[in-house]
Structure formats: structure tokens, C-alpha cells
Image (cartoon, helix red, strand yellow):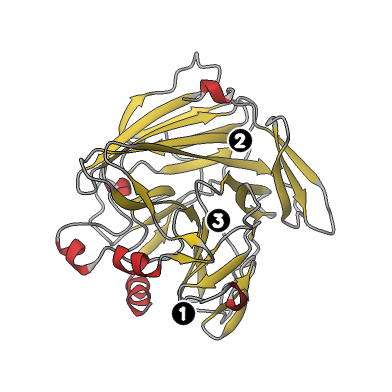
């Protein structure tokens, strides 16, 4: 844990955020999907989803960027928006680092190829992009499909082991939010259950765990739904990791800013991604960044530590892919407009016909928001 804390502290002062507004279509490597209500943009430099917003609202929740970990040059990959951590989440071992293995893996640090651009004739606008990770020996093909009538998109990623030997690996989705979407009023909700802080000791049993949204960070009891400036409730950087009830099929996380009248959300199969990892970052006492990360691991350590630990809360800390094997994981990302007095999300479900996402508001409003999924049938998504 001490090494992880040192890594986090080393990032202080290296994080900056953009303006949070609509991106320019002239940006090199930027590819955009459109429908009448929403827009989603990805960059081939690092493969990140760097914009998803409603067309009537210029605020882009995924405007977060990072500088300082490597030289940032025009057209070259750097960590931004929602990027993919692959083949690992967090730092390599010292020996791996000396041999060029980067923090969070190669996927966000290589140029991706746009293998199928969106077309105006598409009934549902979609694209495919792919990359190869030479050190990890993995390749990934991503398909993104935008719904026709809402801010819902389906992301499908197929990872292939290109080597002749099987290996362990991890795959973590890393969406991060920043101002102006992130401020002291932004509400983060999830159906996660048991969790622990990466700043402390790993709990030896569920009885010693925290329960969402409560967490002990440092010596403070913290409510992770809100992250406020100048409030002494933890460290400059902190990460808390959670699992879901074993009977829960879908995990979800949302971030709502009622002042901006906007909500960003994700929903996924807990069999694909059993962990939710919440990162928080302050700079000069001000709220700067929040990560809404979900993936195959909940321990931010090199593989030697993950193998020795094995599981936490009976959930694995790594996954395995055999020689030549391919495996596919999916999630949905969505944005929607909100009323200005919205109280956050209590419950989120896909309806029985897979036609709608339904969000139940927390008390006192208890209103429902219904989002048409309006995507191709499963048989047509591959």
C-alpha cells in the first residue's frame, strides 16, 4: 500500500482539466458519432472516449486530461476522458517499469486504427477501432454504436492474446470527470455494496468492509456520493474499491450535476466487470477529478501482489486469457438531461424488453427518467 500511496502523491500537480465544452471537429484523430439528440467522440491517439453530451447542452463530462506523466505532443497519445486500462490497472513492477511497461498499460498510450468509420447512411451510427499492445502481446477491437434517439451508446471490446502462451491480465474502464461538470454539487451513485480504501489495509473479511457510499479514508468517515472542496475528508488522492451483490447481474454508476442539468452513467454485466473503483483528487484544496472506474480488478498493485492476494470479498483480482484466445466485454454509457432539483439515482434498470434504461430518483422527488436504448438487436452487434 505504501508504494501505491507514493505513486498517487507523485501525481499531485500533474493533473489538469480542459474547458469541459464541446470539442472542435478539427482536432486531429477525433472521430464523432451523431444522432439528433447527442454526440459521442473518440480519439485515435490513445483510443479514449473524450466526449459524450447532449446537443442542447454544451457541457462535456469527459473533458478530463492528464499531463506530466510523459511529454504531451500534438497527435500523440496521453491519458484523457474515458480511456481503457489494459493489460493492467495501476503501476507495473519495478522490473517491468525498467523495461518500458507503462502505468495503466499500453492501450491508452498507443495510436489506435479506425478500421470502420461512421457513415451518414448508418441506421445506427457506429465505428470500429483497434490497437495492438506489443509488450503485453494483446490486441483489442472496439465497436461503438450510438442509439438513434437518445444519449445511449453500446461499447463492445474484444481482447485477443496474440502470443503462444496464456497469461493473466486486467482490463479496467477509466472514465474520469472534471469541471465544470464536476463541482461540489455533483452526485455519484451506484448499486455497489462492500468496499475498502486503497489507502488502508485490505480487509480480511466482509465484516470489516465499508458499505457504499460510506468509506473510511485516512481517519475520516466519508460519504462518497459528494466530493467537496476545502473539506478535510481524506488525502489529496484516494481510491476506494467496491464489489456488487453476488445476485446482481448489472453494475452501474452515475454522476449527476443538477446545476448543469446533466447526468453521465454506465451500466455493465458484473460477470464482465465485478469491481467499481472510485478515485478522487483535490488540488490546492479544490475538487479537481473523480474517476468512475469499473473493471476486472479492485487492487491497484503489480501482479505479484495480486497473485499473492488472490481474491477480496470472494471476487478475483485478475483474469486469464489463453494462447490465441479472444474474449468480449460490453458496457453502455449514457448521458441525459435532468431537472435542476434532481436528488440523484436510487435505482437503475434495463427493462425486460431491453428497450429502455429506467432511472429511479432518490427521495424526495422519486421521479423516473426513461431513456430509449434503441440499439440493434444483439445478433446484429458483432
Q: Who's the residue at 73% across and 51% down the image?
A: 347
Residue 105, image x, y percentages: 30, 53
Query: In the rendered structure, which disc, 3 or 2, sits on the residue that comes first in sequence?
Result: 2
Q: Nearer the viewer, residue 250 or 174?
A: 250
Determine the CA span between mark 1 and mark 2: 40 Å
Residue underneath mark 2: 151
Q: Are marks 3 and 2 in contact (CB under 8 Å)?
A: no
Residue underneath mark 3: 180
Q: Who's the residue at 31% across and 43% down the image?
A: 322
Q: Which of 186 and 198 is in front in this view?
A: 198
Q: Who's the residue at 55% across and 75% down the image?
A: 205
Query: In the rendered structure, which disc, 3 or 1, sits on the residue that comes first in sequence?
Result: 3
Q: Do the residues labelled 3 and 1 touch (CB within 8 Å)?
A: no
How many neighbours does mark 1 have within 10 angstroms: few (below 14), some (14-19), or many (20 or more)?
A: few
From this view, report whether residue 203 is shown above or below residue 45. Answer: below
Q: What element carries label 2?
A: loop
Q: Which of 56 and 142 is in front in this view?
A: 142
Could you say which quadrant of the image residue 232 lies in? bottom right
- Compared across the picture, whether 114 is left or right of 272 comes to left
- Compared across the picture, whether 59 is left or right of 133 comes to right
Farthest residue to the left: give it. 99
Residue 176 visible in this rendered orientation of the protein: no
Residue underneath mark 1: 201
Determine the CA span between mark 3 and mark 1: 34 Å
From this view, report whether residue 283 is shown above or below residue 157. Answer: below
How many neighbours does mark 2 have within 10 angstroms: few (below 14), some (14-19), or many (20 or more)?
A: many
Residue 261, image x, y percentages: 68, 48
Q: Do the residues labelled 1 and 2 touch (CB within 8 Å)?
A: no
Amino acid at each position: 500500500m505504501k508504494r501505491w500511496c507514493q505513486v498517487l502523491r507523485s501525481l499531485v500537480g500533474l493533473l489538469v482539466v480542459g474547458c469541459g465544452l464541446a470539442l472542435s471537429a478539427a482536432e486531429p484523430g477525433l472521430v464523432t458519432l451523431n444522432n439528433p439528440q447527442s454526440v459521442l467522440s473518440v480519439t485515435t491517439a490513445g483510443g479514449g472516449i473524450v466526449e459524450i453530451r447532449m446537443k442542447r447542452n454544451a457541457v462535456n463530462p469527459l473533458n478530463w486530461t492528464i499531463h506530466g506523466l510523459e511529454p504531451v505532443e500534438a497527435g500523440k497519445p496521453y491519458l484523457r476522458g474515458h480511456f481503457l486500462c489494459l493489460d493492467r490497472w495501476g503501476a507495473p513492477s519495478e522490473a517491468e517499469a525498467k523495461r518500458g511497461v507503462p502505468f495503466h498499460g499500453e492501450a491508452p498510450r498507443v495510436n489506435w486504427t479506425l478500421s470502420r468509420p461512421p457513415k451518414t447512411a448508418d441506421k445506427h451510427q457506429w465505428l470500429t477501432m483497434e490497437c495492438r499492445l506489443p509488450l503485453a502481446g494483446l490486441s483489442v477491437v472496439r465497436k461503438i454504436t450510438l442509439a438513434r434517439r437518445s444519449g445511449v451508446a453500446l461499447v463492445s471490446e474484444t481482447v485477443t492474446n496474440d502470443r503462444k502462451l496464456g497469461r493473466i491480465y486486467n482490463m479496467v474502464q477509466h472514465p474520469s470527470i472534471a469541471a465544470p461538470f464536476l463541482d461540489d454539487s455533483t452526485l455519484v451513485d451506484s448499486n455497489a455494496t462492500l468496499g475498502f480504501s486503497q489507502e488502508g489495509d485490505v480487509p480480511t473479511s466482509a465484516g470489516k468492509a465499508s458499505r457504499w457510499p460510506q468509506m473510511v479514508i485516512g481517519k475520516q468517515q466519508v460519504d462518497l456520493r459528494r466530493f467537496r472542496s476545502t473539506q478535510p475528508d481524506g488525502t489529496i488522492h484516494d481510491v476506494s474499491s467496491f464489489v456488487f451483490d453476488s445476485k446482481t447481474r448489472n453494475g452501474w454508476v452515475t454522476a449527476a450535476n443538477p446545476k448543469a442539468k446533466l447526468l453521465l452513467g454506465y451500466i455493465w454485466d458484473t460477470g464482465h466487470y465485478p469491481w467499481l473503483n472510485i478515485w478522487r483528487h483535490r488540488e490546492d484544496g479544490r475538487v479537481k477529478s473523480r474517476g468512475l472506474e469499473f473493471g476486472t480488478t479492485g487492487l491497484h498493485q503489480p501482479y505479484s501482489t495480486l497473485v499473492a492476494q488472490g481474491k477480496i470479498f470472494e471476487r478475483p483480482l485478475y483474469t486469464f486469457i489463453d494462447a490465441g484466445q479472444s474474449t468480449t466485454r460490453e458496457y453502455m454509457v449514457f448521458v441525459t438531461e435532468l431537472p435542476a432539483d434532481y436528488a440523484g439515482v436510487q435505482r437503475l434498470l434495463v427493462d425486460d424488453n431491453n428497450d429502455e434504461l429506467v432511472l429511479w430518483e432518490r427521495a424526495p422527488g422519486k421521479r423516473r427518467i426513461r431513456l430509449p436504448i434503441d440499439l440493434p438487436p444483439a445478433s446484429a452487434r458483432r
